[in-house]
């Protein structure tokens, strides 16, 4: 970065800027110069702060300085509880389902998070979903969440291979009053998808099943997805394993492959979001 005429470069450690952004900017302003925070550099004027470097930015209204590529908030348990508290609350049915699923033991980790359920309901409403597909139903939390967001007369096709876990789902579908909207098929998902029309009729798809199968599910769903329809993939961060070079498990390798493939696929517009264990949304162009 070039120095500005008549302005001094004021070096300020980035940790000081993040800890007290207003104070850091005030010191730079008083010195008649600009703050240099090691890659996050901003000129301080009387009324605003302008971006000067592609890797740094400052929100002038709130005086928050940070690296553009490192802007995130780590969730503590207290902050996570705050997030959940500011989402639509679980009703009694979903709460009971979550409790019963938790009692199953370690396998309960396959259930989606509370905020994911609320997100799926909202997303189904946003895309006005009439035809939805779920791959990986487990005990039914995500299916109920999607079904509740469907347009009137909307239908959800659920694909799973477990009679044991989906027996719980069926009970809760009935309790939630969505059983008539859900077609649950016990068979390998690719076999079920192959029976669907090849025409693009699906509005929304949610994939939360065997990770090695994600790429195949994507390729089977995409031709059947309408324009502007959305496919959602769960667990795309895989507990952070996707960036662990030493982790060569088949599931991890498959997720890396899926993530790279979707991000580069010109047939879709995709975003990866750090919700729970990571969600990727791919909109068909």
Image (cartoon, rainbow, N blue to C red):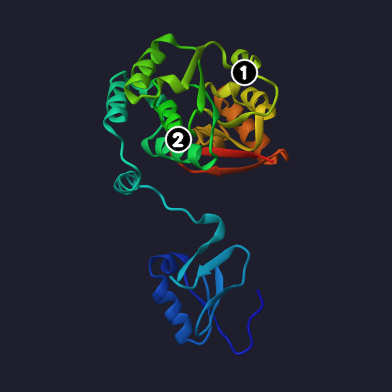
Disc 1 element: helix
Provide residue 70's location: percent of width, then percent of height. 52, 55
Compared across the picture, whether 110 is left or right of 90 comes to right
Q: Is residue 285 visible?
A: yes
Rendering quarter of residue 265: top right
Q: Residue furthest bottom?
A: 6
Q: In the figure, 163 relative to 148: above or below?
A: above
Vertical relation: 164 (above or below) 46: above
Say which of 58 and 149 sits in front. Answer: 149
Viewer-proximal residue, 210 or 76? 210
Looking at marks 2 and 1 on the same chain, the residue that comes earlier in the sequence is marked by 2
Side of 220 where 60 appears, left or right: left
Which dot marks residue 149? 2
State the residue position of label 1.
193
Residue at left 66%, top 27%? 224
Residue 100 found in image quarter: top left
Q: Badge 1 local density, few (<14 within 10 Å), some, or many (20+)?
A: some
Q: The C terminus lies in which quarter of the figure?
A: top right
Q: Is residue 137 visible?
A: no
């Amino acid at each position: 970065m070039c120095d500005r005429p008549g302005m001094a470069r004021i070096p300020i450690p980035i940790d000081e800027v993040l800890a007290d952004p207003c104070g850091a900017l005030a010191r730079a302003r008083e010195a008649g110069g600009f703050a240099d925070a090691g890659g996050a550099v901003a000129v301080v004027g009387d009324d605003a702060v302008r971006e000067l470097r592609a890797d740094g930015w400052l929100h002038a209204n709130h005086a928050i300085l940070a690296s553009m590529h490192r802007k995130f908030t780590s969730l503590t348990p207290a902050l996570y509880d705050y997030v959940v508290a500011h989402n639509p609350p679980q009703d009694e049915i979903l709460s009971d389902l979550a409790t019963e699923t938790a009692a199953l033991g370690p396998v309960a980790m396959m259930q989606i998070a509370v905020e994911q359920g609320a997100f799926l309901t909202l997303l189904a409403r946003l895309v006005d979903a009439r035809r939805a597909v779920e791959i990986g139903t487990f005990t039914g939390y995500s299916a109920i969440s999607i079904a509740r967001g469907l347009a009137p007369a909307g239908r959800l096709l659920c694909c799973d291979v477990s009679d044991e876990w989906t027996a719980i789902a069926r009970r809760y579908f009935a309790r939630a009053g969505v059983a008539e909207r859900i077609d649950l098929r016990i068979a390998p998902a690719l076999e079920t998808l192959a029976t669907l029309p090849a025409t693009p009729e699906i509005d929304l798809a949610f994939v939360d099943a065997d990770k090695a199968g994600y790429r195949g599910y994507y390729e089977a769903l995409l031709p059947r997805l309408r324009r502007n329809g959305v496919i959602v993939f769960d667990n795309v961060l895989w507990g952070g394993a996707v960036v662990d070079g030493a982790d060569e498990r088949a599931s991890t390798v498959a997720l890396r492959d899926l993530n790279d493939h979707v991000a580069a696929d010109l047939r879709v517009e995709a975003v990866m979001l750090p919700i729970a264990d990571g969600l990727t949304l791919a909109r068909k162009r």
